[in-house]
């Protein structure tokens, strides 16, 4: 079984493009905090390359922005290629199958109530 779950923040806005056949693809990097940090040390993060296809790419185009906290559910995929210098290179990407918002909604100022003066008649 190949399934991963990540909770993290986007390091920049997603890069959206289309394949030659018109299929939407989005790529972005997710910063995921490590669970434990050394004593008296700042928290550290790992950075994962995320690729989203078709509907998930359109979702990324419409709703994802730098700094937003999201959950990505997907699978790992390895790829390799030969660079211009003739050296074989490798990468592991996360292929997003599901994307969810993880930030709490930003709320407006709470409603204010008009003060009722002592001389005002109550409606009941």
Image (cartoon, grey):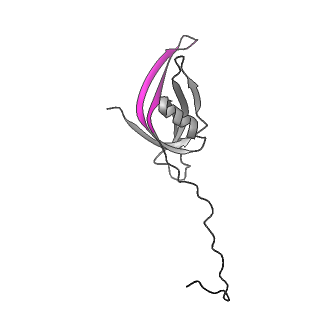
* Of the pair 62 and 65, the residue shown nearer to us: 62
Reply above or below: 14 against 104: above
Q: Position of residue 48 (x, y in %)?
A: 50, 34
Q: Quadrant of the N terminus?
A: top left
* Of the pair 34 and 78, the residue shown nearer to us: 78
Looking at the rendering, which quadrant does residue 117 occupy? bottom right
Q: Position of residue 8 (x, y in %)?
A: 51, 43
Residue 18 visible at all = yes
**Residue 117 in the figure: left or right of residue 60:** right
Residue for point 43% across, 24% down: 78
Reply above or below: 104 against 89: below
Does residue 82 show up magenta in the picture?
A: yes
Q: Quadrant of the C terminus?
A: bottom right
Does residue 109 show up magenta in the picture?
A: no
Looking at the rendering, which quadrant does residue 3 occupy? top left
Reply above or below: 99 against 18: below
Residue 53 visible at all = no
Residue for point 63% across, 73% down: 113
Q: Position of residue 79 (x, y in %)?
A: 45, 21
**Residue extent of the magenta highlight:** 73-98
């Amino acid at each position: 079984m190949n399934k991963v779950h990540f909770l993290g923040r986007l390091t920049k806005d997603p890069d959206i493009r289309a394949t030659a056949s018109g299929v939407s693809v989005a790529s972005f990097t997710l910063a995921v905090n490590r669970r434990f940090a050394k004593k008296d040390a700042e928290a550290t993060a790992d950075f994962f390359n995320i690729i989203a296809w078709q509907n998930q790419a359109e979702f990324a185009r419409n709703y994802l922005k730098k700094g937003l906290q999201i959950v990505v559910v997907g699978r790992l995929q390895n790829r390799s290629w030969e660079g211009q210098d003739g050296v074989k290179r490798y990468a592991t990407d996360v292929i997003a199958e599901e994307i969810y918002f993880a930030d709490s909604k930003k709320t407006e100022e709470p409603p204010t109530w008009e003060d009722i003066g002592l001389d005002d008649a109550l409606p009941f």
